[in-house]
Amino acid sequence: MKLDFSEHPHRRLNPLTGEWIQVSPHRAKRPWQGKEEEKSADQKSRYDPGCYLCPGNERAGDAKNPEYTSTFVFTNDFSALKPDTPSESFNTNDLLVAKGEKGLCRVICFSPRHDLTLPEMELSQVREVVDLWVREYRQLGNREYINYVQIFENKGEIMGCSNPHPHGQIWAQETIPDEPAKELKQFKKYYEKHGNTLLQDYLEIEQQENERIVVQNEHFAVLVPFWAFWPFETLLVSKRPFSRFTDMTEEEKEALASVISRITIKYDNVFNISFPYSAGFHPAPTDGNAYPEWHFHMHFYPPLLRSATVKKFRVGYEMLGSSQRDITPEAAARLLQDLPEIHYKKGK
């Protein structure tokens, strides 16, 4: 009997981390009797006087936002990392181990509008966000003690987003965090063996098969990775193998804004809601090393499974054994491919 990815349980390797995922496509046919989240209201005002991210409003302490009209960035009033942390180590018998971690956290408001997320913004406005990401990556990465700049967004209250105003975050720190550190290890191993970046060769396969690519343009492709864990997970990959935000040409910055706009519009169109996700970039570290093996990319991790109110949880076997999914990446890709690139609100 030949293995059928759409019918038979199987495992897939995530070459970015070296970890395996269990795929059980036959389970997608089972009836759902689990928890359903309450659907959030999709209507917000252009300005909220109680929002601490809206222009002109008060924040924590004595801080007050300017009357900004484009993007706006500031140091998080409740930063998880601080630049004055002592670099002191603690070790008891190699069992109780800790070390001080310097860093700083920034908040990026994508728009002065309280009611506009990335997929609802004009392309020119998304480009302004891209330009701000580039500037922050450069400026933070130039600090002597900053060796990694993690840029990300939590969209939607079910992702733990504490404020509905469209915004993202940056955590810049001394050490390379665990997830990009896993990727760096795999990138180096592949580059030393093959002479190309791992994602360069992977993207070539995806373009040849043309089964899991959702949107693309001259400079970037967004696809459901062969090893995806989240139901509608996607991976954004640059077609040219570069490693840093600061390596992008002006044409690539414009193309990045365009492809982000297109994939996030498709996400909102899946269930005709503001689609929640955690998303973030994995650029190369900023520690001064070259990293020819690193390939610029971005991850989208959306939790919704069967509807606007059914969420994918990591429980049981996934916490104690291995990651597992029911809907195959190929099925998820087909669904995303078929969705329009005009936002559902504008299509009414």
Image: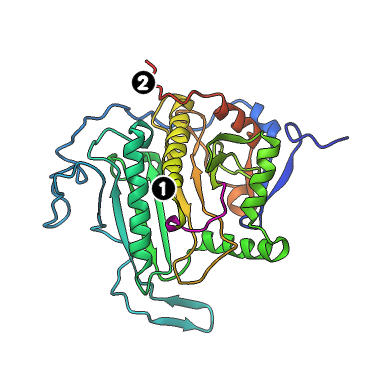
Location of the C terminus by quadrant is top left
Image coords of residue 133 (percent x, y): 36, 52
Q: Is residue 16 above or below residue 288?
A: above
Q: Residue at x 63, y 61 (%)?
A: 186
Location of the N terminus by quadrant is top right
Pick whichever, 98 or 147, lies toward us: 147
> Would you say residue 240 sits in the magenta stretch?
yes
Q: Residue at x 44, y 76 (%)?
A: 98
Report which quarter residue 30 is drawn in.
Answer: top right
- Residue 32 visible in the shown view: no
Which numbered circle lies on residue 346? 2
Question: Hey, what amino acid is under mark 2?
Answer: Lys
Image coords of residue 23 (percent x, y): 68, 41
Q: Is residue 320 above or below residue 113?
A: below
Furthest toward the right, the residue is 1
Pick whichever, 88 or 203, lies toward us: 203
Question: Hey, what amino acid is under mark 1?
Answer: Glu
Q: Residue at x 72, y 46 (%)?
A: 11
Furthest toward the left, the residue is 62
Label 1 or label 2, whichever comes before in sequence order? 1
Q: Callout 2: few (<14), some (14-19), or many (20+) C-alpha neighbours within 10 Å? A: few
Furthest toward the top, the residue is 348
> Would you say residue 339 sits in the magenta stretch?
no
Q: Residue at x 36, y 35 (%)?
A: 123
User: Which segment did they paint magenta?
Assistant: 239-246
Q: Name the residue that disc number 1 marks.
A: 250
Image coords of residue 309 (percent x, y): 45, 29
Under circle 1, the secondary element is: helix
Which numbered circle lies on residue 83? none
Q: Callout 1: few (<14), some (14-19), or many (20+) C-alpha neighbours within 10 Å? A: few
Report which quarter residue 144 is drawn in.
Answer: bottom left
Q: Is residue 157 left or right of residue 206?
A: left
